[in-house]
Each structure stands twice: as structure tokens, then as C-alpha cells.
Amino acid sequence: MKTLMRSLTVAVVAAVSLPALASAADYPPPSNPGTPQPRPGGAKTLKVCKKGGQYKTIQKGVDAAQAGDTVRVCNGTYREGVKVEGAKKQGISIIGNKGNPAKVLINAKGQRHGVIVNSANDVTLQGLSTNGYVQNGFFAVNVDGYKMDRLLATGTGVYGLYAFNSVGGEMTNSQAYYHTDAGFYIGQTPKQEKPKRTIVRNVSSWGNVLGWSGTNMRYVNITRSYFFNNGTGIVPNTLVSEKYPPEEDNVIENNDVFWNNFNYYKGAPFGEVKPATGSVPYPVGVGILLFGGRDHTVSKNRVFGNWGAGVGLVQQLLLVGANADLEKAEAIGPEPWNLRDNQVVGNVMGNGGKDLNGRDLFYDGSGSGNCFSDNQLSEGVGNLPDFSPVAFPACNPPGAPGPVDTFNEAAQGEAVGWALALADEKNPAPGGTIARAFSTSYKGYKPFSKASGGAYMVWKKGYKAPPVPK
């Protein structure tokens, strides 16, 4: 039975994590951007317009720009993919319509990326929208510093806003929806002695398989943002398919994470997502999930209406004992699959009883130093007991002995059975037949549909997109 449960666990947890693998193999290799070469005599502004501008395409404006220049883009549709590459483009800004990014549309049909910034530090992308790309909307790779602000990324690519092998950036005031993996993603963050933190603030991610995915990401603060109507809300995770595992030292604070029950297998604006695990669908219905990782703080979030669970911590079972692979992946520290020193504190669950989670918390007891304190849990009929036969250790004051975690394989096995039940026949029923409280709006946001009979929400054509965050 133990062997069977272990194999089922691996299959289901793989289903949660494997979307992050998509299309990474053909990205540019890591590199050093080098020293910029500023324009002699100072920065200039170049204008891109369909009529009356210096340049008719954004790419021609970028090609003409030197370090520190600004490329201003008029309203219109630009049928191109844009590349910003090399130290000579360091510090340039591409600015469209900051008040209404949808009016500057990069329609990158057939292109891998809407805009890719590669090996050019401190580039600013602002007031732009992109649609129709194959892989990513806005993509920064191999950079030290970037700014993505007031952007709108609509699928059906893999990721909306994406940073890879990069440090010290910003993603702010932006929206991403209808992606076959995640609306927002930061991954493969190099280890730093003096970390440069990345700030994610006031973003909205919905209608995606995952609202947020971050494989081996570190030093990221996600705050004052909205993750809703996705399959799963926020999923930092550890994998050896990318360098520098595990993910660590991230802060997820003061966000609204709700209604992540999107059963995209039953209807979506993109084609069916085929799980890399074969017949096991990616499970849905979780708000925030730490899949391995260490030194995370999950605090002061409002988490509700996620019909599987609100906040969960699960060991990265796929990596247990995979020492050879970990050496190849340049793993940092021992046993990166274990949960370590993560804090879940001060979160508010259930929206005052209006939108209950299936379970507010679940935890398999693995790792060490993980703790839970001052979370306001739901009360009343409709939510199941918090998911773990083991205790949720409290966070001790500074200087006191750390919390003691007790691994319980039975708890982990129960998690597997629960996840498999959610994925059953591509029509998961949250919590069996237990009724769910459910509201139809929150701060102006609306769900795809009000599900009945325990079925998950399904996208309906004509769903009105929420406004781009201001």
C-alpha cells in the first residue's frame, strides 16, 4: 500500500508542477549583458507611428535606439514580434499608452514572443499590450534589472509576463489572462550574496492554468495583487529542469486569492492542455501552494472560494533521492525537495463566510521549521477540517526554539487521494457533496460561472474582462 501511495503521490504532484516546464529548452542561454554604450550627447526620443512617425514598426524604432533612449509608440496595431537584445540597448524605454495599454497592441501571431528583452539591463516596457504569440507576451531573460509596467498580455501563449535567469526587476499594474501555463512567471533566479529583490505589485491574473508559477524563483515580493478564476492561484515550485533549485526567500503578502476553480478541461479559450503525466489531469481548486521550497512568508492574504484548499505546503516528492540530477542542476544546499522555514501567518480565510475554501490549510508535515500562526480560519458549514492529521506548528518568537515538524506519510497519502478525486474524469467535485457558500462578485470581479452540483467553474464565451489595474 505504501508503494502504491507513493507512486500516486508522484503522479499527482507532477501534474501540479509540470506546466512550468513548457518551452524552456529553446530560450537563450544565460549570459552577461556587459557594459552599455550610451548615445554620445545624451538620450533621445524616437517616435513610432503608423502615420507621421519616424518609424512605422516598433522593431525599427528599437533597432535605431541606443542605450538610454526612449521609443514612444502611438496607438495602433503592430503585427510583429519585438526583440531588444544586447548591451547596446541597455536602459531603453518602450512606452505606449500608459492610460490604456490595449490601444497599443502588438499582435504577434506566429511569433514566439510579443516582446523579448535579452541581455539588455534596465529596459522599461510600459503601456503596451500583446496577443497571439506562441510562447510569451513580455519576456525578460539574462538581465540585471527590468521594469514591466501597465502591460496587458492576453494568450494563448505559455506565459503572459515572464522573467527568467534575471534579477532585480519590477512587474506592476499589469494584467494577464488566457495562458496555457501561467499569467505571470519568474524562474531560475541566481543565488546572490547581496540579493536584489524583485517587486510584483498590483497585478491581476485570471483565466490561466496557473495564476502565478515560479520554478526556482527567489527574492520576489508579490503584493496587493489579484489571482482568481485560474486553475490554481499561486504556485512557487522546485524543479531540476531549471537551474538553482529550490525556490526560496519569497514573500506573498496582502493579496486576494480567490475562485481558483477553473476547469479548463471542460471549456477554455485555448486548446486542451495535455498533461505531461499522461492520463492524470492537472488538479485545480487551490489558492496558494508551496511545492517544496524554503524561507517563504505567506502573510496577510485574503484567500477564499478555492474549492480544494486555501493555502497548502507539500514536499517536492519528484526530487526525493534524485542526487545525480540535482548535481547536474547545480542544486543549492541539501535536500531541496524539503519544505524548510516557511511561515504562514495572518491570512484571512473564507471572505467572512461568503466564499469558503474546501479546506483553509493543508500540510504534509515534511521538512523542518515550517509554522502557522494567527490565521483567521473559516467557520460554519461548508468547509472541511483543515487538511492534515498532524499539527500545524506555531511560529515561535525570535530567539525561541524553532517549531517542530512531524512528517506523516499517511497525511501525504491522504493528500494524494484528495488530489486524484479532484482530477477524476476531468470533472472534479470539490469536497464530495458538501455545499459551498459562493458569492457572485468581489470588488467588481466576477466568476466565470456559478457552478452547481459541486462541479468546477467553466469558462463561457463572452466573459467580460475585468479592467486593467491602475
Image (cartoon, rainbow, N blue to C red):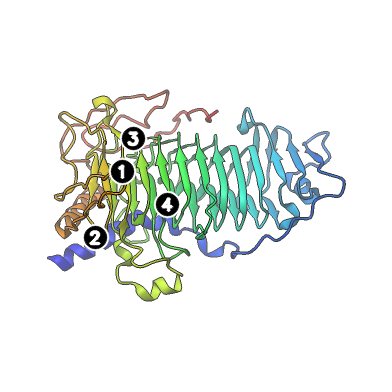
Looking at marks 1 and 4 on the same chain, the residue that comes earlier in the sequence is marked by: 4
Q: Circle 2 sits on which residue?
A: 9
Residue 309, given in percent of the width and then of the height, sits at 26, 42
Disc 3 secondary structure class: loop
Q: Is residue 10 above or below residue 250?
A: below
Gap in angstroms between the C-alphas marked 2 and 1:
23 Å
Q: Counting residues from the N terminus, which is met first, the one under dot 4 or under dot 2?
A: 2
Please state the horizontal and vertical placement of residue 51, each as a whole percent of the image: 80, 34
The mark lying in front, picked from 2 and 1, is 1
Circles 4, 3 touching at the beta carbon (< 8 Å): no
Q: Is residue 376 above or below residue 313?
A: above
Kind of residue at disc 1:
Val
Q: Element under label 1?
A: strand
Q: Amino acid at mark 4?
A: Asp
* Mark nearer the viewer, 3 or 1: 1
Near mark 4 (Cα within 10 A), the count class, few <14, some 14-19 or many ≥20, is some
Judging by the rendered image, the residue that carries numbered circle 1 is 344
Q: Which residue is mark 3?
A: 259
Which callout, 2 or 1, points at the residue further toward the start of the chain?
A: 2
The residue that disc 4 covers is: 249
Name the residue: 76% across, 46% down. Answer: 68
Q: In whole angstroms, how far apart are the C-alphas of marks 3 and 1?
A: 20 Å
Say which of 373 and 72 sits in front.
Answer: 373
Q: From mark 4 to mark 2, how far is it between C-alphas?
A: 26 Å
Label 2: state its secondary structure: helix
**Residue 166 lies in quadrant:** bottom right
- If you read the primary sequence from the N terminus, does the residue marked by circle 4 or circle 3 appear first? 4
Apparent side of residue 315 relative to residue 239 in the rendered image (left or right): left
Check disc 4 and report its element: helix, strand or loop: loop
Q: Amino acid at mark 2?
A: Thr
> Of label 3 and label 2, which has the lower sequence position?
2
